[in-house]
Amino acid sequence: MAGHKGQPYYDIFLRYEMWLETVEKARILDGEGFELLLDLEQTGSLTASARNLGMSYRKAWGLLHDVELHLGFNLTEKRRGGASGGRTLLSEKGRQLVRAYNSLRHETDIAMKSIAKVFFNRINEINSL
């Protein structure tokens, strides 16, 4: 937010997005992928997580598969089910990746608030010229 209510630009926000990509600029893991991992941690079901996020099972499976190929480790552990069905759980490395992302996101949010404040102060200075 650019300032307090009543100040110019108080209703304008600076938004940003983060993702992992290859040197060729191919996205490996973005916000949607991390949302899938977070939901999967809660549900234990790739089918349910895909449904919760409005994506097909095939897209969710492909996303996980691509990330695992690029990062070189399994994000999930599959458990075959009996009468109650199977489960897809985050592996320990998958849980560590989610924790690392949450920490990165938190630290980036703090830094971006400070950076945005300086940016919007400059815009307000420009406006007052």
Image (cartoon, rainbow, N blue to C red):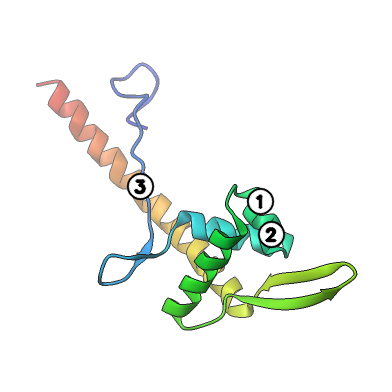
Type of the residue with mark 2: Thr
What amino acid type should be assigned to the residue bearing mark 3? Tyr
| Residue 68 location (% of width, % of height) | 50, 77
Disc number at residue 16? 3
Tags 3 and 2 touching, CB below 8 Å = no
Please say if 127 is above or below 89.
Answer: above
**Label 2 environment density (alpha carbons within 10 Å; few <14, some 14–19, many ≥20):** some
> Viewed as shown, does residue 59 lie left or right of 112?
right
How crowded is the residue under tag 3: few (<14 C-alpha within 10 Å), some, or many (20+)?
few
Q: What residue type is labelled 1?
A: Arg
Q: In this view, does 52 lie above or below 78?
A: above
**Location of mark 1 (residue):** 51
View extreme (bottom): residue: 72
Mark 2 and mark 1: Cα distance apart in space = 6 Å
Residue 42 is situated, as x and y percent measured from the top left of the image, at 71, 60
CB under 8 Å between callouts 2 and 1? yes
The residue pinned by badge 2 equals 47
Identity of the residue drawn at 39% across and 55% down? 108
Relative to 22, say whether 105 is above or below. Answer: above
Extreme residue in the top direction: 6
**Marks 3/2: CA–CA distance:** 29 Å
